[in-house]
Amino acid sequence: MAGVAVALGAACGGDGGPDPGDAPHAVDRDEARLTPELVAFLERIEAATEVAFTARYDVLRKLGGEESVAEVVQRPPRARIAVGDLVVATGPDPSTCRLDTGDCVDDVDEAALAGHGLSSRFFAAGPAQQLRATASRDDADPPVFRRDRVAGVEVDCVEVAVAGTTAITTCATGEGVIAFHDAAPVRIELTEYHPEADPDASFDPTPSG
């Protein structure tokens, strides 16, 4: 995964907010600057909410250097995200539960996920939104595409530089699931991936589920 390692060193190290779905600040953006190849890549990522899979990620929130592990099981239209003591279920019966206290709410608590540098869309539309906004900036260089391997999976990667410095690197599986995302606020890297939902996973909105 040498290509990704190079990208890590070049990516911006500041903090632009905890949610990888947040677009970087820029005054001038023009989506007409997006190439057809990049648009196709973005659409593949955005459609990943319809993909069944099981994955594990290492997450680094750059502000403060917080490291965590996030586990995702998606069986459309439901997904389950577990990070630390937090369990979030999305879909028809959304919920957010704290394993340590047993407290649950019948909604997706994005603020709780943001505390780990994540959002409920961090494996799909969140990074795609940020990549789209960065590539649309007037001072963005043309995107650079390459193939790589992450967690033993062949992935497609895109790097976008702003004013000559790599600002964002995003990689996705053939199904569109985010495999690697390195931008100002957070770095997300896939460590385990299965292209099907864990048959033993429960989407029951309870801490024990």
Image: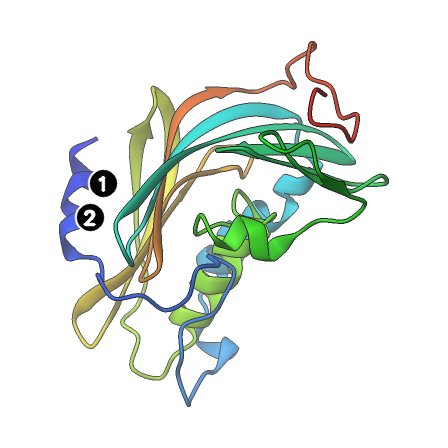
Residue at image coords 21%, 61%: 13
Residue at image coords 60%, 24%: 53
Residue at image coords 38%, 40%: 156
Residue 162 at least partly seen: yes
Task: Give percent across and percent down for residue 76.
Answer: 75, 32
Task: Give percent across and percent down for residue 192.
Answer: 42, 21
Closer to viewer: mark 2 or mark 1: 2
> Residue at label 1?
4
- Write down the quadrant of residue 191 in the picture: top left
- In the displayed structure, does residue 9 sit left or right of residue 130? left
Q: Pick whichever, 160 or 118, lies toward us.
A: 118
Task: Give percent across and percent down for residue 175.
Answer: 56, 33
> Residue at label 2?
8
At label 2, which amino acid type do we have?
Leu
Mark 1 nearby-residue class (10 Å; few <14, some 14–19, many ≥20) = many
Q: Pick whichever, 78 or 157, lies toward us.
A: 78
Q: Kindly indicate whether the residue at mark 1 contacts the one at mark 2 (C-beta within 8 angstroms).
A: yes
